[in-house]
Amino acid sequence: MKPGNRLPLIAAAAIVVAVVAGTFFLRGGRTPPAAVPDAVVATQDSAPSPVVASPAAARPAPAGAGRPATNEAMIEQLDQRARRREEHLARTAALKEQSAQRYASEQVDPAWAPGKITELNGIAADPAFEVAGAQPSNLSIDCRSSMCRIDGQFEDAGKAEDWILLYTASVGSAMPSSVVSRIRNPDGTMRVEIYGRGR
């Protein structure tokens, strides 16, 4: 190569060296930063990356999820209680009807009935009834040859229930089996009717 032809080549090389040196000088001699892993970049972001929920997670939980007892179970329990109560009432009504028919069909035994009536009235006259405030406003007791009928009127349901509890607990062997019915009168007072076997 001729010396005249080398001059442009030398000038171009000098320019390249000058550009590289200038760039290095402007950067202050620092080396280029190393590549930072993606995971580190993600933790250094000032704003958190948005969380995209899956369609299943976005759906609300079904009502009642996680509850110890479901509504269906509670409804079933209430239905069972109602059925048992209806069955009990039906059995009581049938027993009352049978007892009333037996009482009505019996003739009075004059050797037994008066003594049994006195005994049942004596139980009803126990001072415990007065102390408890569970006295009837009107009480009638009648016996036939084996069956007795007790009819009491009470000011309200509370007094009627208290009297039933005390009387049935006190009567014992004087009337070993009986059926109790309650009737609410139109004026709000209560009538209690008991049919029982006296012997």
Image (cartoon, rainbow, N blue to C red):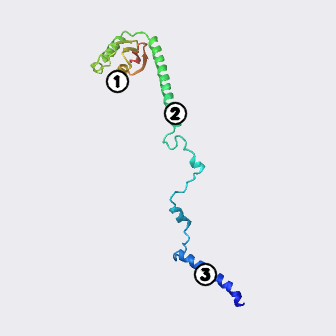
Q: Residue 5, image x and y in percent? A: 71, 87
- Marks 1,2: beta carbons within 8 A: no
Q: Which residue is mark 2?
A: 75
Of residue 106 and residue 188, the one placed in the foreground of this image is: 188
Q: CA distance from mark 1 to mark 2?
A: 35 Å
The residue singled out by tag 1 in the image is 169
Q: Mark 3 falls on what kind of element?
A: helix
Q: For the point 32% across and 14% down, which residue is it?
A: 121
Checking the image for residue 17, the label placed there is: 3
What secondary structure is marked by label 2? helix
Q: Residues within 10 Å of mark 2 (few under 14, many from 20)?
A: few
Q: Which amino acid type is marked by label 1?
A: Ala
- Is 72 located above or below residue 12 in the figure? above
Q: Earlier in the sequence, mark 3 or mark 1?
A: 3
Q: Earlier in the sequence, mark 1 or mark 2?
A: 2
The amino acid beneath tag 3 is Val
Residue 63, image x, y percentages = 53, 40
Please tell me whether mark 2 or mark 3 is closer to you in this view.
Answer: 3
Q: Nearer the viewer, mark 1 or mark 2?
A: 2
